[in-house]
Image: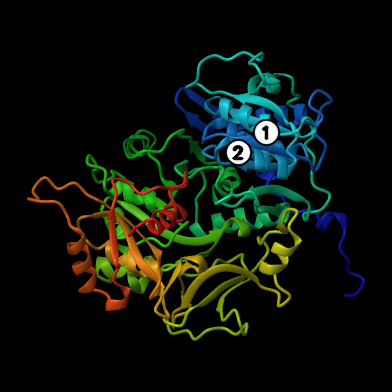
Amino acid sequence: MELLLPHPSNSSPLTVLGFLERAASIYGDSPSLLHATTEHTWSETQSRCLRIASTLSSSSLGINPGQVVSVIGPNVPSVYELQFAVPMSGAVLNNINPRLDAHALSVLLRHSESKLVFVDHHSTSLALEAVSFLHKNEKPKLVLLHDDTSPSLTPDVEGFLDTYEGVMERGDPRFKWIRPKTEWLPMVLNYTSGTTSSPKGVVLSHRAVFMSAVNSLLDWSMPNRPVYLWSLPMFHANGWGYTWATAAVGATNVCVRRVDAETVFDLIDKHQVTHMCAAPMVLNMLTNYPNRKRLKIPVRVMTAGAPPPATVISKAEELGFDVGHGYGMTETGGLVVSCAWKPEWDHLEPNERAKMKSRQGVRTAVFAEADVRDPRTGESVKHDGVTVGEIVFRGGSVMLGYYKDYEGSAASMREDGWFYTGDIGVMHPDGYLEVKDRSKDVIICGGENISSTEVETVLYTNPMVKEAAVVAKPDKMWGETLCAFVSLKYDEDRSGPVTEREIREFCKRKLPKYMVPRNVVFQEELPKTSTGKIQKFVLRQMAKSLP
């Protein structure tokens, strides 16, 4: 046995980039990308990606292997293609949230040392302003993205080197894409949300991305040739890995520039969508849409990004959405925990079913281990659904580390062999994990640790509440008290407005006294990130200014 060693024939580095080659071979004439009047097949998508990769690595653009190429854009075909084309050139892919301001964008461009940026036509002013903050030797080249919904643009747009189509036309469709010499080479650089002057750049290897994408397919049992609606931003952890996973199964990717309830329902009906991913806030938006109606065919939805209230899941399923629930982080490249459904739960009452589905669940099949541990002792907490601890992971899709941040990497990837997430959770007796909060979102009132998520779950059961978020408000006596921010549903039959006292009394009937919000602030809509997460850091600042 000792003579049986690894050989080039059995040691090809793992990479998702081969998924595109396979898709073009098997599903060549099948639709790959749909958007407005655009329709590409998988053969066309492969050719376009190879052309872009070819030009990136040519002398005209001169992007060397390992250098960073950034993308600023919404869910349009060109942004999908770049998820393959950039790493096929040997460069490291960096997706950037187009909703950042110019200063935050400049911080990321400087930190990543990006050499070239593909910029959507709606973000040209943003990119030019961001680049103006950089020193001459830091300024990346800019290439303009436009699609069938944008005006005709020429390569001589001021400040831009070329257009996306111009770059493509110069490329070679027979280009031999650059395969990684080792699966541990960096492929993706993603910045976590809440970027400040000290950004956290998550570096994922080809191996990690491959493990994440295969994991997503296996756990969701995604069949061949599904119709996938891009309601989740591709820039958010590469769409949880589905930018590559959909190629592996020859999916039809329905792209959507702007997500709103009317558009989502129209596209589901028009293209007979079978699958989509969505943050809980997007599900909430769909269930509160005035013109909502039950779907003609069921649509499988994977939700993650924040603990979803059971009420939101229940209402979504009433419309015909088959909701699955997962949990992951930018640092894990996608979802690594999911609420694996058991047949014996089928017979539960709808509300009980929704409660079971609101739990994050168990580790996915491709992932190694997930646990909840006491961060002080490193020991697993009791599996009682009550004792809280920090959620920890170990598996092949965990990041290589934070770019240019050795201390941050060491703090989260500790010597005991676990990645510490910073999320607070419990482990139920059946081994299913449930996220209770981010560690920074736990509110300590009079010495009591209170999960803001638990209070929000109760608020969502109020029939008048559309959105809810609970944050800490500084208090001289208690240290912190609970402040609830709430947006309300419109009810034409109601005689008067909902009051703060009414919300507090509702909470008193369902929560211990110490968990009842001291303040209730009504807003027309709560501030959110582009991925649908409520911006609690904004609400914390607002709470500080309250009397």
Report the side of 541 relative to 331 (left or right).
Answer: left
**Looking at the figure, which quarter contains the N terminus?**
bottom right
Location of residue 97 in the rendering, given as x and y in whole percent from the top left corner: 56, 41
Mark sitting on residue 133:
1
**Residue 21 appears anywhere in the view:** no
Location of residue 70 in the rendering, given as x and y in whole percent from the top left corner: 67, 37
Q: Residues within 10 Å of mark 1 (few under 14, many from 20)?
A: some
- C-alpha separation, residue under disc 2 versus residue under disc 1: 8 Å
| Farthest residue, direction right | 3
**Looking at the figure, which quarter contains the C terminus?**
bottom left
Cβ atoms at labels 2 and 1 below 8 Å apart: yes
Location of residue 263 in the rendering, given as x and y in whole percent from the top left corner: 35, 35
**Residue 4 appears anywhere in the view:** yes
Query: Hey, which quadrant is residue 56 in on the image?
Result: top right
Which residue is identified by label 2? 103
Q: Amino acid at mark 2?
A: His
Residue nearest the observer in this picture, 446 or 74 = 446
Q: Of marks 2 and 1, which one's residue comes earlier in the chain?
A: 2
Q: Residues within 10 Å of mark 2 (few under 14, many from 20)?
A: some
Mark sitting on residue 162:
none
Q: Please report the residue visible at 73 percent of the width from the left and 59 percent of the height from the top.
A: 400
Q: Amino acid at mark 1?
A: Phe
Location of residue 174 in the rendering, given as x and y in whole percent from the top left corner: 76, 28
Up/down of 455 relative to 63, above or below = below
Q: Please report the residue visible at 88 percent of the width from the left and 69 percent of the height from the top.
A: 4
Q: Please report the residue visible at 38 percent of the width from the left and 58 percent of the height from the top.
A: 543
Q: Please report the residue visible at 70 percent of the width from the left and 72 percent of the height from the top.
A: 414
Q: Secondary structure at mark 2?
A: helix
Report the side of 331 relative to 431 (left or right).
Answer: right
